[in-house]
Amino acid sequence: MSFPRLYDFMGRRGSIVGEVAMDEVRVPEENLLGEVNCGFNIMLCAFNFERVILGGSGLGVARAAFEIASQHAQARVSFGQKLGQKQLIWDMIAQMSWKIDAAELLTHRAAKMYDSGIDGKDLMREAGQRVQVNDEL
């Protein structure tokens, strides 16, 4: 067994991610995870779980960014007015809020489906859905 390539992800130093190469590896039948030659399907199920978990992680970052943006808009004075009093800025913050709420609902739905035992292709769509929280700020 060898690890020909490892990937370096920003913010994910605790998880080692990379390729695993196995050449002439023999696994006793009692140690198999699933059926022979069905490893790809097992991996897809693991990806569904990871997508749900990463959705929660992204929500935490989005909520923190939203709090920082809201506080900044309420405190920062520009041209004699607080930024939060400007309609364009307030609209951007309002859009951030509902997009975060939508992302939270999608993530909770996928997590609930996973917890109830739904997996594989039945969970793939829900686990992979994303809401772009903010492309303007």
Image (cartoon, rainbow, N blue to C red):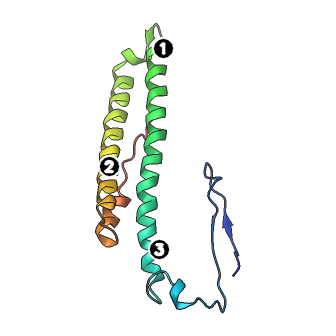
Q: CA distance from mark 2 to mark 3?
A: 22 Å
**Residue depicted at 34% across the width and 45% down the height:** 103
Figure check: 16 above or below 25: above
Q: Amino acid at mark 3?
A: Met
Proximity of marks 1 and 3: CB atoms separated by less than 8 Å? no
Proximity of marks 1 and 2: CB atoms separated by less than 8 Å? no
Q: Amino acid at mark 1?
A: Ala
Q: Earlier in the sequence, mark 2 or mark 3?
A: 3
Q: Is residue 131 left or right of residue 27?
A: left
Q: Earlier in the sequence, mark 1 or mark 2?
A: 1
* Residue 54 picture location, percent across and down: 46, 53
* Mark in front: 1 vs 3: 3
In the rendered image, the residue lying farthest to the front is: 30
Q: Which residue is mark 1?
A: 75
* Residue 79 picture location, percent across and down: 47, 10
Give the numbered dot on residue 43: 3
* Residue 109 picture location, percent across and down: 29, 53
* Mark in front: 1 vs 2: 2
Q: Which residue is mark 2?
A: 108
Proximity of marks 2 and 3: CB atoms separated by less than 8 Å? no
* Residue 104 picture location, percent across and down: 34, 44
**Residue depicted at 61% across the width and 52% down the height:** 12
**Residue depicted at 43% across the width and 47% down the height:** 56
Q: Secondary structure at mark 3?
A: helix
Q: Earlier in the sequence, mark 1 or mark 3?
A: 3
Which picture quadrant has residue 74?
top left
Q: CA distance from mark 1 to mark 3?
A: 48 Å
Q: Secondary structure at mark 2?
A: helix
Mark 1, other Cα within 10 Å: few <14 / some 14–19 / many ≥20: few
